[in-house]
Image (cartoon, rainbow, N blue to C red):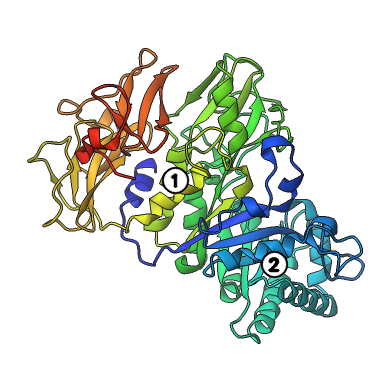
Amino acid sequence: MRLLVLLALFAVGVQPFENVICYFGSWSVWRPGDGKFDVEDIDPFLCTHVIFGFAGLSNHTWEIEVLDPWNELCPDESEGGNNCAYNRFTDLKKINPNLKTILAVGGWNEGSEDYSNMVMDPEKRKTFIESSVELVRRHNFDGLDVDWEYPAARGGVPEDKENFVILLKEFRARFDTFSPPLLLSGALSPGKPTIDDGYDVPGISEYLDMVHVMGYDYHGTWENFTHHNAPMCGHHLDEGYLQDFNVEFTVEYYLSLGLPKEKMVLGIPLYGRCFTLDDIEENGFYAPAHKPGPAGPYIRIPGTLGANEICERLRDDKTCKIVHDPSMNEPYFYCSSDKIWCGFDDQDSVYLKARYAKNMGLAGVMAWTIDTDDFRPNCYHEKFHLLNSIKRAFALAPVSTLPPVSTTRNPALRPDCTNHVDGTTFVHEDCNKFWVCINGYGVLEMCAPGTLFDPSLSACNWEEAVDTSSCSLWVCEVDNVYYPHEDCDKYYRCYNGEPHVEVCPNNLFWNQFILQCDKPVNVDTSGCNIP
């Protein structure tokens, strides 16, 4: 199964991959210190759509409800209004006129029961829809994102499955009365039981412009063992229903149920799920862990760390070890200081997920949430290091399926792709890298951890299945051994037996000959990607 995922990275992309959708958790304005994130911290050119989360549903009036009036409304429209966050959010379009701003309603904390009661009553549905239209248009939003978590669950009833489609149908009819029509999207669960019980997928797909599939929260501290928050593919120890808890299964299952690729948006988390190990010596997947990991300084929720909290923890706690399990695309880390274990996404894993979505022909990706990226930045040389890695992944055109490998050249140097079709691959001197021709240019790619490039497949394969006699293997037996990265402005530093990505500051490039960052003019860039 892992090989199929890797091959999918190089399959033909059927639809244009144009959408990067970023959720903004408005409550992040109340976080302390460097975790505070307000509307003005959003880069309006980083995403194609930004979504303001969340509005709610009043179970008294059945109207859409502003959950934080002091922050979100202005003094002239509400006695309790102050910060005008809605208007400041939609004013981002004055900076980038191509940006779409969406208001989300629902979310986990809203629960399900009120939404279940609303959708079963035609008058309550009408009230909710009309009040939503009024709020969206008053604040110049481009549409509404419905994030009901979840129909037929958490106090809902089986009839929610049908009634949810009725609600969306009525929303669609009302939204289409405007020119241009208001946008209508929805966020859907990745779990098969929730999908089966709560979603009429063809019906939902008919009325939504985009369907945001939440490719995360597969595992967490509601379980008593360690596992990754957002596994791209299954772990070899997964059994029973747990074999369905991964991104690959979720995407394929939704497609099999009739969700069109051109409407499916793959959700990527900018946070990790964390546990406290029962025994620090048992620190792999499925290790016993009956308590959540300690809360971080910003989100302040036990069991969850934002990417900004994770990078600072790994920067400051020298007892932490990052591990890439050969079965997985995503890393985890554990620290002996407090026995924390976190499955998280880094620049490489979000890159792979975005490439997977692109080459599967999906409509795009969605990030939850922009405010937990390293936005200041405190760890990396660029703001929003994960979102920028996602954007770099889909900036490349989809590549065609596996033409033959060419080996008649110096493998360390960029190949001449002038007379080669897109997707032609070339070996590299490092076993875990390869060149691929895209739009007449040689782009350096790297295999996922635990795999190496297999010339016989023109794809990455398990390490044990690849002949490594003609290429170099990385060895991180001692600290502070350095290897060049596929991007010219980065490099790998060995630490605790694992290669860690480091970024050169001040627009410098890595110079492998002197083992330090250097002026670009002094660096041979024929063997790396120029950012």
Q: Residue at x 45, y 16 (%)?
A: 496
Q: Residue at x 23, y 23 (%)?
A: 513
**In the image, what residue type sits under mark 1?**
Ser
Q: Residue at x 64, y 60 (%)?
A: 51
| x, y percent for residue 457 | 22, 44
Establish if 104 lies above or below 492. Answer: below
**In the image, what residue type sits under mark 2?**
Lys
The disc at residue 389 is 1
Residue placed under numbered mark 2 in the picture: 161
Direction from residue 91 to residue 73 in the image, left or right: right
Q: Residue at x 44, y 52 (%)?
A: 391
Q: Is residue 181 in view from this perspective?
A: yes
Figure quadrant of the N terminus: top left
Establish if 298 lies above or below 112. Answer: above
| x, y percent for residue 290 | 71, 26
As drawn, which residue projects farthest toward the left? 408
Q: Nearer the viewer, residue 30 or 218?
A: 30
Q: Secondary structure at mark 2?
A: helix
Among the 4 quarters of the image, the one containing residue 227: top right
Q: Is residue 355 in view from this perspective?
A: no
Q: Nearer the viewer, residue 480 or 185?
A: 480
Q: Secondary structure at mark 1?
A: helix
| Number of numbered discs on residues | 2
Cα separation, mark 2 vs mark 1, equals 37 Å
Among the 4 quarters of the image, the one containing residue 201: bottom right
| x, y percent for residue 300 | 74, 35
